[in-house]
Image (tube, rainbow, N blue to C red):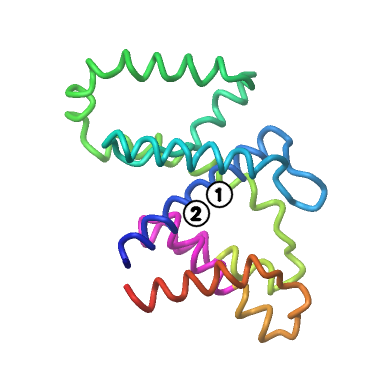
Amino acid sequence: MVLLLHSYLLTFFDTAGTLTSVANLTGKVNKNGEVEGIDKALLADSVATSVGALAGTSNTTSYIESGAGIKEGGKTGLTSVTVAILFLACLIFAPLAQSIPAFATAPALIFIATYFMRNIKDIDWDDVSEYAPAILAAIIMPLTYSIAYGIALGFIAYVVIKALSGKHSELNSGSIVIAAVSLLYFIVA
């Protein structure tokens, strides 16, 4: 049960973080900070994950590298098809790629991290109850090697800080539920 909860949280937070970052690149975030059409994207991602699991593959998910294709002008399904064909062609090079030491891939990972950091400008830096959970999440991610842990702790901190600072009215039911499930996961795990 704990592993299943962990898997759902990990997938949800990884996907939500990636979709939000990619949506910022494409201008699909409205003036209220909401991602337009995120319900369709989450549905597509969850269907792909379920079909992948039934096929016996590892977890399928959206990936932040989509931002590179989007920045170059790819905004249709043809971009995804092209990437899929190129990934398939790379299968013959997989053994060669595995021979590359981890320290050699670090610059690419740092470059990908910069896509996430672009969104930091949107934080309300005048309100500690807004920026403290965001900074906590950003610090926890590299320390735990998990985007999901960072986001989960960010949600918990957001709800706790808003409640303790008397800003209960700024909390919505979604944030409270996600924080409660995250807290339950950390307690049980």
* Residue type, numbered disc 1: Ala
Q: Which residue is mark 1?
A: 16
Secondary structure state at the residue bearing disc 2: helix
- Please name the residue shown 68% across and 78% down the image: 162
Residue 74: x %, y % from top left: 61, 19
Q: Splitting the image into 4 quarters, where does residue 93 fall?
A: top left
Pick the front one: 176 or 56: 56
Residue 23 in the image, given as x and y percentages of width and height? 65, 39
Rounded to the nearest angstrom, the CA distance separating label 2 from label 1 is 5 Å
Magenta residues (range): 136-157
Pick whichever, 175 or 48, lies toward us: 48
Specify whether residue 106 is painted magenta.
Answer: no
Mark 2 Cα shell of 10 Å, populated few (<14), some (14-19), many (≥20): some
| Residue at far right of view | 31
| Mark 1 crowdedness (10 Å alpha carbons): few <14, some 14-19, many ≥20 | some
The residue at the point 32 percent across, 72 percent down is 189
The secondary element bearing badge 1 is classed as: helix
| For residue 157, side relative to residue 57 (left or right) | right
Residue 157 position in % (x across, y down): 56, 74
For image coordinates 54% across by 27% down, the residue present is 68
Give the numbered dot on residue 13: 2
Which secondary structure class fits the magenta region best? helix
Residue 147 in which image quadrant: bottom left
Could you tell me if the residues under marks 2 and 1 are in contact, i.e. CB atoms within 8 Å? yes
Amino acid on which disc 2 is placed: Phe
Looking at the picture, does residue 98 appear above or below residue 50?
above
Image quarter of the N terminus: bottom left
Q: Is residue 144 magenta?
A: yes
**Where is 73 relative to 10, above or below?**
above
